[in-house]
Amino acid sequence: MLGRNARLDLVIDVKHLIENPDLYRASQRARDADESLVDRIVSADVERRASITSFEDLRAQQKAFGKKVAAAQGEEKQRLLAEVKDLAASVKTTEAAADEAKQRLEDLQRRFPNLIEDGVPAGGEDDFTTVKTVGTARDFSADGFTPRDHLEIGELIGAIDMERGAKVSGSRFYFLKGVGARLELAIMQMGLDLALQNGFTPMMTPTLVRPETMQGTGFDVEHDDEIYKLERDDLYLVGTSEVAIAGYHADEILDLGEEPIRYAGWSTCYRREAGSAGKDTRGIIRVHQFNKLEMFVFTTVEKAAEEHARLLAWEEQMLAKVELPYRVIDTAAGDLGMSAARKFDCEAWVPTQETYRELTSTSNCTTFQARRLNIRERLVGQDGSKGGTRMAATLNGTLATTRWLVAILENHQNPDGSVTVPAALQPYLGGLEVLPVL
RNA sequence: GGAGACGUGCCAGAGCGGCCGAAUGGACUUCACUGCUAAUGAAGGGUCCGGUGAAAGCUGGACCGGGGGUUCAAAUCCCCCCGUCUCCGCCA
């Protein structure tokens, strides 16, 4: 049986598993995961502890012996040396066993998805709940014309060039040109200003990262077909600056007592879109390369849920600024992926598709990423004394992406193909009120 | 890309294969002294994982960039990797 302190200080996964195995099983069931994993993790941890104990005992003996050897001389020394050899051998084998046990536990834990937050709807991709719907879809028949899709508009106003994108780089690549390039920068800049007002530190991040960084953030570099890999250099192109920022504080102990640490990462993002052949092939809805402004927060487990609400609120503020009708959905458990405990998406109405499309996404990853990246918080007792460390929590949320162009162009289009610029965005376009047809 | 130097605690900086978790400064904490500050003197400290205790504490193990190896024994010797710096080359 484990000692009292051992139980309290177990790695958070295992600790939770031991205390709440049913909770974990329920979470796993929601994701159709392997239920026996819970029991295997618990027993792997017991094994690990036993093997570490026997290694440490032997090692202590060896050390004591070493002191005698160092002090002894001549024949006495030779005799002791012969005696300690066996001990050294068993130290080696028990150490190897302990390392193996640690590795086994780690591998099992790595396969374990994050615990789902209370209230997350059950089910799969189609089982999300709509938290709210804001604004109403524009009635183009009342305006007396049939809406053009974003690519048609983009070509009319000289904003998007898919054809040459394909010529230069292949399908799903594009050029943003003229007002298109300006609009992209305007949206990003507006998002950055909002982030600054709310205490975020802007970051321009590396877009190539090491495998450990990719893994730590929760992406599987071996099996994830979405990730571009540079074989020669063993580097990976990020699909979001979340990866770089999560890795930024890897192996660090943070002071999270007062305010969360908030970063706004601005980077180009790369996705292979391997599994989506034939899907969203027109225009810039689904492309290999785009820009994203991403909020990323390090905080405590207790504050994570309220920070999640804040991230969502900031995303909604951004959507309000660009005057788009949207809905907020609470993603169902089975559609959450490994790392998120809960995820809210804001989806904007896309007129020509007559449906809502994801524009932002915010996830509460609780301690999932922090565990893999070894990001802890410094605990301080009420009297100010040191209190050890504990896993931190991480969250992320999109503030703007290239995809926003789609919704803005389509929703604010005029009969002649020009586009009215939302008032909040105009200052970022040098006062431009309309993106005119060329 | 070529050549070389280096990576030790909060920082600077020693370190002979065993008495090194690590000298010495500085910073820091506590105490003393001073009307306050400064200065001075004394004492104390690292991180992580365990055991035991109500707690203070006592106690075992790991950690000298990371990973392997040699050895009874590694901060110290060997190999690989990562990183930093200097010079040359190339380059926005």
Image (tube, rainbow, N blue to C red):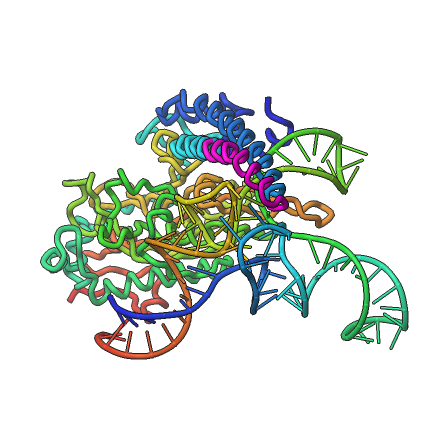
**Seen in the image, is A31 located left or right of residue A282?**
right
Front-most of residues A104 and A225: A104
Question: Residue drawn at (66%, 44%), measured in percent from left and top?
Answer: A387
Residue A109, quarter of picture:
top left
Question: Residue drawn at (12%, 60%), measured in percent from left and top?
Answer: A168
Residue A151, quarter of picture:
bottom left
**Seen in the image, is A332 located left or right of residue A9?**
left
Counting the numbered discs, the total is 0
Instruction: Judge whether A192 appears above or below A368 on screen.
Output: below
On the image, the x and y values in percent for residue A272 come to 22, 46
On the image, the x and y values in percent for residue A393 come to 50, 43
What residue occupies the far front of the structure in this picture? A75
* Magenta-colored span: A70-93
Is residue A75 rendered magenta in the image? yes
Question: Residue drawn at (21%, 42%), measured in percent from left and top?
Answer: A353
Front-most of residues B52 and A363: B52
On the image, the x and y values in percent for residue A287 come to 21, 50
Q: Pick the quarter of the image with the C terminus of chain A.
A: bottom left
Front-most of residues A26 and A433: A26
Q: Main secondary structure of the magenta part?
A: helix
Question: Residue drawn at (46%, 48%), measured in percent from left and top?
Answer: A311
**Seen in the image, is A228 located left or right of residue A347?**
left
Front-most of residues B4 and A178: B4
The answer to whether any part of residue A321 appears in the image is: yes
The answer to whether any part of residue A323 appears in the image is: no
Q: Pick the quarter of the image with the N terminus of chain A.
A: top right
Is residue A11 rendered magenta in the image? no
On the image, the x and y values in percent for residue A153 come to 18, 56
